[in-house]
Amino acid sequence: LLIAGAAVFGDTVFARADPFEVYSSLVARLSPFGRRTDGVLVVRNPLENLDGQPARPGLVAVVSVLLGSTAFDSFKESSRWVRYSSLHFTGHVALLNTVALLGFCLIVLGTFSLASAATGWIGHIERRGLPNLMAHSVVPIVIGYIVAHYLSFFVATGVGTLQLLGDPLSRGWTLTSFLDGVDKYAIYQHPTILAVTKVVSIVTGHVLGIIAAHDRAVRLLPQRYAVIGQLPMLVLMVAYTLTGLFLLFSS
């Protein structure tokens, strides 16, 4: 489909419809590197790069899928969910998880859209385009969740991949022999460090998200509603933080 679309519409299709490119381009908005309008590479505040994210149609859906799917990955590993699904849905666990995954994404989509609309209602501004204009503020939260939920998996799989890379054809090569004595599961032997890192990642992501939402709200809202108009998004961000920490410690 992407190749056919590119043949008709050009490489814009990849930037707009290829999930991996859309995902990586969105996350890259928090990079400290950027380009000026004249193409010169510069170093600047990552939140400035994030603020430059265009409010294109579908942006809210993208961040909802990224945040909802990552949250569900943590939720499905909780002992209560594993026990419930295996006890009541034996033989249909995959279907149940698929429905729950969709539900998580829809919950994020619904709550974020409602909070954005409430911001417009309280701030007496047009509400229709607000979800897309505020969606960039979810990106730091997504990155925080990714670090928290996939850090240990990334380290273990990364070390294992490098070990295998030294002899990809099983011919006895020793290109990465310096990793032979490294235990790829060693990271799991440091639960305290893992827990602290994950909590810091989630909290930092939410703090940056609140800052990004605040900056955008101040710019959009009339001055007399600049404070009270931010309350819906603030409540939502706090709820996301508490939910993220709950899911983290329940898995």
Image (spheres, grey):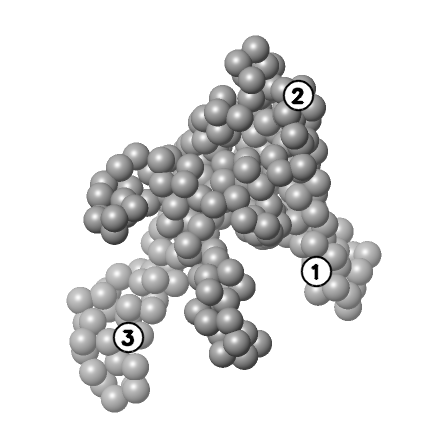
Rendering coords of residue 227 (x, y %): 55, 14
Q: Residue at x 24, y 76 (%)?
A: 166
Residue type at mark 3 is Leu
Report whether residue 166 is seen: yes
Q: Is residue 242 above or below residue 109?
A: above
Residue type at mark 2 is His
Q: Which residue is mark 2?
A: 124
Rendering coords of residue 107 (x, y %): 70, 43
Rendering coords of residue 123 (x, y %): 63, 20
Quadrant of the image containing the C terminus: top right
Tell me the CA gap for discs 3 and 1.
Answer: 33 Å
From this viewpoint, which residue is outermost toward the right? 88
Task: Residue 165: give its label.
Answer: 3
Q: Residue at x 49, y 78 (%)?
A: 7
> In the structure shown, which secondary structural element does the residue marked by tag 3 occupy?
helix
Quadrant of the image containing the N terminus: bottom right
Taking 95 as reference, is 227 left or right? left
**Nearer to us in this view, 55 or 22:** 55
Q: Which residue is mark 1?
A: 98
Tell me the CA gap for discs 2 and 3.
Answer: 58 Å
Q: Is residue 110 above or below residue 170?
A: above
Task: Residue 57: give its label.
Answer: none
In front: label 2 or label 3: 2
> In the structure shown, which secondary structural element does the residue marked by tag 1 occupy?
helix
